Image (cartoon, rainbow, N blue to C red):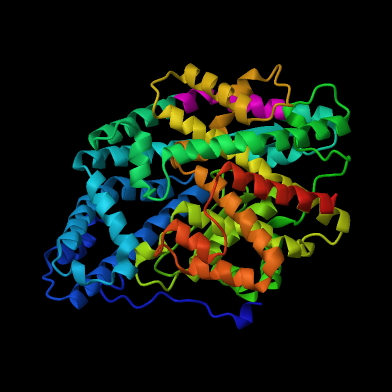
Amino acid sequence: MIKNISIPTKPKRKFVAQNLIIDSWNKIKPFFEDLLKRKIKSVSELEQWMLNRSELEAVLEEDMAWRYIKMNIDTTDKVLAERFHFWIKEISPKISPYSHKLNIKLINSKFLKDLNKKKYHIYLRNVKKQIEIYREENIPLFTEMKAKQQEYGKISAKMTIKVDGNDITMQQAALLLKDNNRKKREQIFKKIEKRRLKDEKNLDDLYDELIVLRNKIAKNANFDNYRDYMFAAMGRFDYTPEDCFNFHKAIEKEIVPIINCFEQKRKEKLGYKEYKIWDTSVDVDGFNPLKPFKGGKELTDLSIECFNRLRPFFGDCLSIMKKMKHLDLESKNGKAPGGFMYPLYEIGVPFIYMNAVGSQRDLVTMVHEGGHAVHSFLSRDLPLTEFKSTPSEVAELASMAMELLSMDHWNVFYSNLNELKRAKLEQLEKALGTLPWVAAIDRFQHWIYTTPHTAEERKQKWLEIDSELGNKIINWKGQESSHKTMWQKQLHLYEVPFYYIEYGMAQLGAIAMWRSYKKLGEKALDNYMNALKLGYTKSIDDIYKTAGIKFDFSIEYVKELANFIKKELKKLN
């Protein structure tokens, strides 16, 4: 597989020094000064200026990305943490004022009117919005917030429980909740619960501090609340908070009853009088947990084969990443929780990070992040770095669609047909099951940043939201503390506020993309790739149209897609 692929190299820099080592602000300040002071005498010189700026941004973002990746891989290494925090404290705050001045220089250029409007419309729209919300007094607050957000990963990475004399991570412990022995599941859950509740107050206090900081940032920028500020900061030009509320209602009306029906059937099949939280992952037919691979190497190789069968280009993307060691997949002590694909804009080959323990969920995470990686490869040749920085509603369409598109080739992970069927059933139920949780987290955030509250009131609000959008079959008696703090497991609330509803919107898009694939086959994959190649040069609506689907989350559309999934589930049952 490796011998036939071409390994990318970084393009030769035309503006930034080739051998630049960023160990002080003074090393990069001259490049910003050059851009700021340069005389621009024509539209072609303006475009060259934009390309030079883009190159600088790519170099800086990639340098910061590696610091972040390495720190997450080993949170116990103080040197790695210091290298990342040096960037956050010494570099990022100094970049912000220059970026603002460069934005103003661009917008004020007399040659702006001569730029290709079709090519640059989306980019310039975002630049104008960034100028509008910029406040110098927020720079130190951003620095403080970024540093504080990293505390969540540190707290979570230290969470382990002892099982059979060994310390295991929360991700490894979660796998044991699939065990057929109910008493063992209960014991494991209670150990997890006890360990998590040890940090309940620490996580409450951290969140309180983040909310204060975020609200201050919003007020400084003349917004009524942080929610409205983030809609502007994230460039949400294509929908409003009201649209989000409509999404919540659509999910509550059309999807929650389906999920509760699934859960009621599980309870009946298990034959339990009380359906507990530790019963939600076990196989109802008494089968052992699905184990699609052993270790990170096998996960990598099987994923490459799966992607190859879907479309050889997809497999090549993962093969290149394997060859370049841009994968760190296995869970281990000291490694921060979660999984992500990090774009590296200069080399154009992203990095996949995850905490695999051998589960079906890990398989899904891998193809999900692999979808992001394919997106990164498809947009790598776009001329501006900002063109490659896609909105999450599009980025998550790439990844969530890949979860479903790849299912036809999961037989590389499962030679046993019954296990393959179980994996597909689980995935289709998850395609719907994800939606209520996404709606709940998003509804929670809207309330958090528009309503003054205490930590206890926050927990009560979560219980209220969960009663509307959550699993109504679970009996939480005895686990009330876990119930009201379950939101603390959601990394996004701490580290990337308001980045979550995109998963719900993209999940609807992914279901529509898969439906299109079942009708059109290779033509649908062509549409998928053509949409991803656009990066962020078109509106979200236009990108979805290029993919052959709609950017829509009305009650009618949600119902239509839910019915399609239910039909596909019947075929498997």
Visible residue check, residue 249: yes
**Which quadrant holds the N terminus?**
bottom right
In the displayed structure, would residue 469 be above or below residue 288?
above
Visible residue check, residue 377: no
Per the image, is 203 magenta? yes
In magenta, the rendered stretch is: 189-204
In the displayed structure, would residue 337 be above or below residue 65?
above
Residue most extreme to the bottom: 4
Q: Main secondary structure of the magenta part?
A: helix
Per the image, is 134 magenta? no
* Residue 124: % across, % down: 28, 60
Residue most extreme to the front: 556
* Residue 504: % across, % down: 56, 45
Query: Residue 206's image quarter?
Result: top left
* Residue 276: % across, % down: 76, 26
- Side of 143 where 68 appears, left or right: right
In the displayed structure, would residue 120 be above or below residue 143?
below
- Side of 483 where 286 appears, left or right: right
**Most foreground residue, 220 or 251:** 251
Residue at position x 23%, y 74% from top? Answer: 48
- Side of 194 where 335 appears, left or right: left
* Residue 37: % across, % down: 11, 65
**Most foreground residue, 150 or 209:** 209
Residue at position x 47%, y 46% from top? Answer: 77
Residue at position x 49%, y 57% from top? Answer: 394
